[in-house]
């Protein structure tokens, strides 16, 4: 019997008051904290008689160290950082300035280079960065500025009172596998805050609670996601130039899947490569980690990686849906930023700069609220206005229908994208609709037994141990570690569905779409199918794919005990 | 007097900690290169038997540094006893294994004698009459050669696993054992240890086992573990398992070998029905001999096995148990 994690009831929790609580120490959360600190400093300089304090502003970060759970390609558009810290290029850890881009269409053994790089993918002026290192640096500036960052603390529940968000409850520590208190038990804090700012990244768990509670998705397109599976490699010198950017489409995906790869040359002969698979594919047996391994087997990539060494692995989901999927971003006592809100340009494949800008705008809104000592909807709703009037909307509006154009496959998507280029994103109608990705999943009975065209990307990759790897080996290189004796944080609301229905209908796709081998079907004597779901929760890399892609939508990912998770050094 | 190396071995409740043999082996190498004499010391109460064990090796002399106050172990007690002894004997170099206990008292001891301590050394060099110890830095990304400044006694500890305990040279005759009774004044020992406890009662310390029979998913059912236990018993070893077995509760967590369990390096590791995922392998690849039984010829475990048996473990293990019993009975 699996015992799932939930906050303990009927216990006393320490109460703390705060002005601003930012949940999530990624680029959005850190930019928000830093901007807020700048505004307070400016104010305090000019108004020494009415000083504002930073003491009651907190950032909660579930990882043990700032940046440890941050993963991305990544290419940074410096636009927002130049606004936040005009001199940032002299001190931030930037791996390389982009020097050249190339886009390839891959077939099984061949490649075709696009003669012209499509404008959205032109990266001159951008930087190849490691988001993990970048956030570590940004976080150090936040701490220098005097804002407290609580690492190892996860926000597990939002505290509500009628229509208002009151605060955040942090994780209960020292709870054993059976939900009982261990000798080192510490109840989570109830952090009462005047405003809670959610910057949890893609598919945030508190953001999900918020959206569910206030039906924030009722007048929006359902958010759709992709999963990025990444490996960091060390190559023999001269193989790829620092700042060289390559994008690929096509193999190993077919016209029925959305996605593509990136290869970024970083410094010190390191290369960041990964494959993003849209989480809206039809065949439940598709395995995104296997997709990455198949991609590496392509002669073009295999040649690039020959003689190299894989040093790190990780995966993360990303929100593709664009403008129509962004929920209301402010309410009574709350704001939502970055990937949690869905501020990502899926045409350019960039979101970090938008996350940072959203953090800055939220900080300006929070500062207003602090000045007026009014954190109600009236003041916080200005965040939405600020976003609408900023270059966030300028950038996202023309691509508002981009991902939606791919609802009917690759070819029609390219066609729609083409039309949208010419009419400011309108395409063939003002507002394209889309489905939630998991609804595209077909039942096994509807699919070819041997996988048909997808045969090479379904089920577990075997790996040769040098160029390609099986999932367990890859997971080892994510450095993921959790306290073993704790309840399972992948909350499955009804495991009989896994054991009895899903087994027949979809073949338990969780074991395929999870990039970390968390989900396994093992032999059982007491289920009709002879199989039961088994969780290797401590393998989890916090990507949220299960929460997104489960066809029955019965999985809720909640944060495990704070401090646990991947170690994305250099990612 | 001639330069001496003093190895301080570790004992607990009258049993020598196996890692001490590694330190003695390392110290023998230092002695061979430098030409210095090698002596050993055991600290505790009533440790004559342990001293005799050490005296059987190639050392010039063994000291049993004794006081009733040295049982149980306290950092103040050990530091005081050794400070007095070393202060008097003035060995040139004091070597110890880098164990938890040594980490607890060695800094105090070195400071009390106003000397530096080089810890967790992974090797040493002796060049032109100068002794250098090699230490890992930045989680092993660099190695640094460190030497002492000033006069001895010098203090250094060796990392576990750097030297092979079984490479210790035997003595041609047993060395002399001298009991040194030390006086520890009242008030020197400031803490009184309570009975040791562990949250989970640990009945076995796999890291001390010389033979381990380990089972994985291939064992299929819980009741089949009995067969592996029989083999372990016949061999005089301990039973262990890979993660899925312990996750299912078929064996307790303390018997799990791997990245989220124990790291072991026994003389013999028998892997039965274990695929050899990297998470398991990192916990046992230091084993001296690895024998793997698996019906999948491509199982990764075969990459590190010294002897690979591709076959059904249910066909192989029962006759193996009989053969072991016969061989032992003979």
Image (tube, coloured by chain):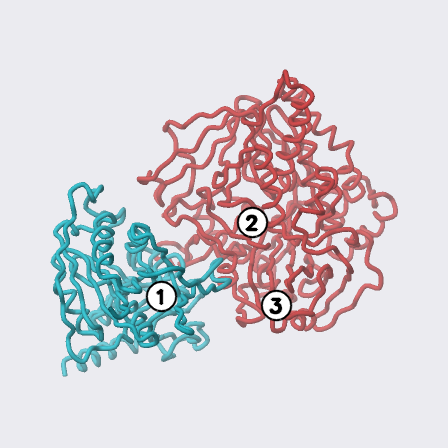
Element class at badge 1: loop
- The residue that label 2 is drawn on is A543
Q: Position of residue A71 (x, y in %)?
A: 60, 51
| Chain on which label 2 sits | A
Q: Is residue B239 visible?
A: no
The cyan one among the chains is B
| Colour displayed for chain A in the image of the structure | red
Q: Residue furthest right?
A: A422
Q: Nearer the viewer, residue A259 or B206?
A: B206
Chain under numbered label 1: B
Question: According to the image, label 3 marks what residue?
Answer: A456
> Which residue is farthest bottom?
B330
Q: Earlier in the sequence, mark 2 or mark 3?
A: 3
Whether residue B177 is visible, yes or no, is: yes
Q: Residues within 10 Å of mark 1 (few under 14, many from 20)?
A: many
Residue at mark 2 shares a chain with residue at mark 3: yes
Q: CA distance from mark 2 to mark 3?
A: 24 Å
């Amino acid at each position: 019997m699996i015992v799932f994690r939930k906050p303990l009831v009927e216990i006393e929790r320490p109460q703390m008051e705060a002005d601003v609580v930012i949940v999530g120490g990624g680029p959005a959360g850190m930019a928000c904290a830093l901007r807020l600190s700048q505004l307070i400093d400016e104010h305090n300089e000019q108004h020494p008689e009415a000083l504002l304090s930073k003491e009651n502003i907190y950032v909660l970060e579930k990882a043990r160290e700032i940046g440890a759970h941050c993963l991305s390609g990544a290419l940074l558009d410096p636009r927002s950082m130049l606004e936040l810290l005009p001199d940032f290029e002299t001190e931030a850890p930037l791996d390389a300035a982009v020097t050249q881009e190339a886009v390839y269409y891959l077939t099984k053994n061949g490649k075709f280079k696009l003669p012209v790089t499509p404008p959205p993918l032109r990266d001159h002026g951008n930087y190849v960065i490691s988001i993990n290192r970048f956030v570590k640096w940004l976080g150090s500036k936040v701490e220098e500025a005097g804002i407290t960052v609580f690492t190892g603390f996860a926000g597990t529940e939002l505290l509500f009172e009628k229509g208002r968000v009151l605060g955040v409850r942090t994780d209960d520590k020292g709870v054993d596998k059976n939900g009982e208190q261990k000798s080192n038990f510490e109840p989570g804090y109830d952090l009462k805050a005047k405003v809670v700012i959610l910057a949890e990244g893609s598919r945030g768990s508190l953001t999900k609670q918020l959206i569910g509670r206030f039906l924030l998705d009722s007048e929006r397109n359902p958010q759709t996601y992709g999963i990025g599976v990444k490996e960091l490699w060390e190559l023999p010198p001269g193989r790829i130039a620092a700042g060289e950017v390559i994008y690929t489409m096509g193999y190993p995906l077919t016209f029925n899947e959305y996605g593509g790869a990136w290869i970024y040359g970083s410094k010190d002969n390191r290369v960041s490569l990964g494959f993003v698979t849209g989480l809206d594919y039809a065949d439940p047996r598709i395995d995104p980690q296997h997709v990455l391994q198949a991609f590496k087997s392509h002669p073009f990539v295999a040649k690039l990686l020959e003689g190299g060494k894989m040093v790190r692995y990780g995966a993360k989901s990303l929100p593709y849906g664009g403008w129509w999927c962004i929920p209301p971003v402010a309410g009574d006592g709350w704001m939502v930023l970055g990937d949690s809100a869905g501020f990502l340009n899926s045409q350019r494949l960039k979101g970090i700069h938008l996350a940072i800008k959203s953090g800055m705008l939220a900080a300006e809104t929070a500062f207003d609220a602090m000045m007026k000592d009014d954190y109600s909807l009236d003041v916080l709703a200005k965040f939405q206005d600020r976003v609408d009037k900023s270059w966030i909307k300028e950038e996202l509006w023309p691509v508002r229908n981009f991902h939606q154009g791919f609802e009917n496959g690759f070819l029609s998507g390219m066609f729609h994208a083409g039309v949208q280029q010419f009419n400011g994103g309108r395409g063939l109608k003002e507002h394209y609709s889309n489905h939630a990705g998991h609804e595209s999943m077909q039942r096994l009975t509807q699919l070819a037994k041997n996988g048909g065209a997808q045969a090479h990307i379904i089920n577990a990759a075997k790996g040769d141990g040098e160029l390609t790897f099986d999932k367990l080996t890859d997971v080892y290189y994510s450095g993921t570690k959790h306290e073993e004796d704790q309840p399972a944080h992948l909350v499955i609301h009804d495991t009989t569905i896994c054991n009895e229905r899903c087994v027949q209908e979809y073949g338990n796709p969780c074991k395929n779409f999870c990039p970390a081998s968390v989900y396994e079907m093992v032999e059982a004597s007491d289920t009709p199918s002879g199989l039961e779901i088994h969780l290797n929760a401590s393998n989890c890399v916090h990507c949220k794919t299960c929460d997104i892609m489960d066809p029955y939508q019965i999985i809720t990912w909640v944060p495990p005990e704070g401090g646990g998770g991947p170690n994305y050094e250099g990612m | 007097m001639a330069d001496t190396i003093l190895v301080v071995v570790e004992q607990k409740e009258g049993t020598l900690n196996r890692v001490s043999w590694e330190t003695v082996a390392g110290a023998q190498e230092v002695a061979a290169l430098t030409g210095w004499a090698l002596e050993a010391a055991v600290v505790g109460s009533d440790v004559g038997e342990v001293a005799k064990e050490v005296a059987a090796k190639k050392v010039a002399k063994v000291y049993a540094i004794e006081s009733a106050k040295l049982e149980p172990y306290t950092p103040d007690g050990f530091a005081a006893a050794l400070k007095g002894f070393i202060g008097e004997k003035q060995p040139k170099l004091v070597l110890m294994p880098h164990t938890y206990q040594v980490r607890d008292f060695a800094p105090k001891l070195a400071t009390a004698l106003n000397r530096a301590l080089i810890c967790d050394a992974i090797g040493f060099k002796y060049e032109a009459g100068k002794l250098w110890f090699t230490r890992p830095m930045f989680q092993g990304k660099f190695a640094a050669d460190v030497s002492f400044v000033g006069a001895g006694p010098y203090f250094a500890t060796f990392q576990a696993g750097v030297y092979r305990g079984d490479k210790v040279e035997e003595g041609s005759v047993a060395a002399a054992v001298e009991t040194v009774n030390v006086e520890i004044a009242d008030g020197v020992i400031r803490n009184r240890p309570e009975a040791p406890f562990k949250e989970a009662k640990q009945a076995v310390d796999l890291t001390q086992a010389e033979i381990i029979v380990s089972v994985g998913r291939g064992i299929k059912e819980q009741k089949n573990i009995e067969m592996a236990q029989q083999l372990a018993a016949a061999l005089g070893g301990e039973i262990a398992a890979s993660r899925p077995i312990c996750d299912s509760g078929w064996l307790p967590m303390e018997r799990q070998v791997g990245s989220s369990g124990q790291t072991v390096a026994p003389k013999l590791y028998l892997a039965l029905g274990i695929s050899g995922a990297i998470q398991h392998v990192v916990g046992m690849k230091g084993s001296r001999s690895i024998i793997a039984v698996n019906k999948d010829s491509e199982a990764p475990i075969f990459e590190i096995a010294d002897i690979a048996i591709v076959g059904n473990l249910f066909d192989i293990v029962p006759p193996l148990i009989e053969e072991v019993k016969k061989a032992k009975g003979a």
